[in-house]
């Protein structure tokens, strides 16, 4: 799997159907529910299973990393490889972020149970990219799912990591 990861691009994690540029949610729990529904539809998973995995992980510590970004993640039975769901929230939602800022950009990483260190490397790559102020601004202004995906693909090439 490490050979796969070394060449992994964001395009391998996200497809058009797993990006939702206009999500309105009242709470972190509702954001995770929407994430689970998108994952179920896009990756052939059961939404309650994904939701439970995300909630269980979130209970260990909030995944709001600051600057309006959250990276919820979980291991989910039924996945054969890492997959991602990206949401742009309006209005922003309290995610218990380290800087107490509400979150409007959510990149959820879903991994098979045997992902191990590959999951940590993927999380690090996502966090590094979303730390870039110009990328966050471009994601907030992007016109739709295709534009968001293009920005993330460009920013998260392995050579840029």
Image: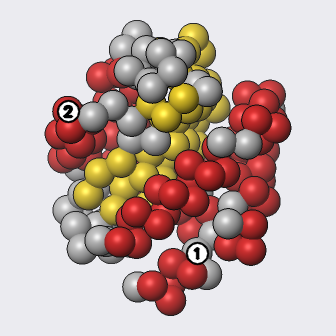
> Horizontal and vertical percent for residue 13?
53, 62
Instruction: Identify the residue at image location x=40%, y=10%.
Output: 26
Q: Which residue is mark 2?
A: 59
Nearer the camera: disc 2 or disc 1: 2
> Horizontal and vertical percent for residue 12?
57, 68
> Horizontal and vertical percent for residue 121?
47, 66
**Residue 153 lies in what quarter of the image?**
bottom right
**Residue 79 lies in what quarter of the image?**
bottom left
Q: Secondary structure at mark 2?
A: helix
Instruction: Return the mark for residue 42.
Output: none
Quarter of the image that includes the C terminus: bottom right
Instruction: Identify the residue at image location x=63%, y=69%.
Output: 9
Q: CA distance from mark 2 to mark 1?
A: 29 Å
Relative depth, front residue between 158 and 43: 158
Q: Is residue 139 left or right of residue 66?
A: right
Q: Residues within 10 Å of mark 2 (few under 14, many from 20)?
A: few
Q: Is residue 90 left or right of residue 84?
A: right
Instruction: Identify the residue at image location x=49%, y=34%.
Output: 65
Question: Is residue 137 at all visible to an observer of this figure?
Answer: yes
Instruction: Tell me if residue 143 comes above or below residue 116 in the rendering.
Output: above
For this orientation, the residue located farthest to the bottom is 3
Question: Is residue 51 at all visible to an observer of this figure?
Answer: no
Q: Which residue is mark 1?
A: 8
């Amino acid at each position: 799997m490490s050979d796969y990861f070394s060449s992994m691009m964001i395009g391998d994690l996200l497809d058009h159907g797993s990006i939702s540029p206009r999500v309105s949610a009242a709470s972190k729990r509702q954001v995770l529910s929407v994430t689970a529904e998108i994952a179920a539809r896009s990756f052939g998973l059961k939404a309650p299973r994904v939701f439970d995995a995300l909630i269980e992980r979130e209970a260990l510590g909030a995944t709001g990393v600051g600057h309006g970004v959250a990276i919820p993640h979980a291991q989910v039975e039924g996945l054969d490889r890492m997959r991602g769901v990206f949401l742009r929230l309006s209005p922003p939602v309290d995610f218990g972020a380290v800087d107490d800022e509400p979150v409007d950009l959510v990149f959820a990483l879903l991994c098979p149970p045997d992902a191990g260190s590959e999951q940590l490397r993927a999380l690090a790559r996502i966090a590094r990219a979303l730390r870039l102020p110009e990328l966050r601004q471009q994601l907030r202004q992007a016109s739709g799912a295709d534009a968001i995906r293009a920005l993330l693909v460009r920013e998260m090439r392995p050579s840029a990591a």
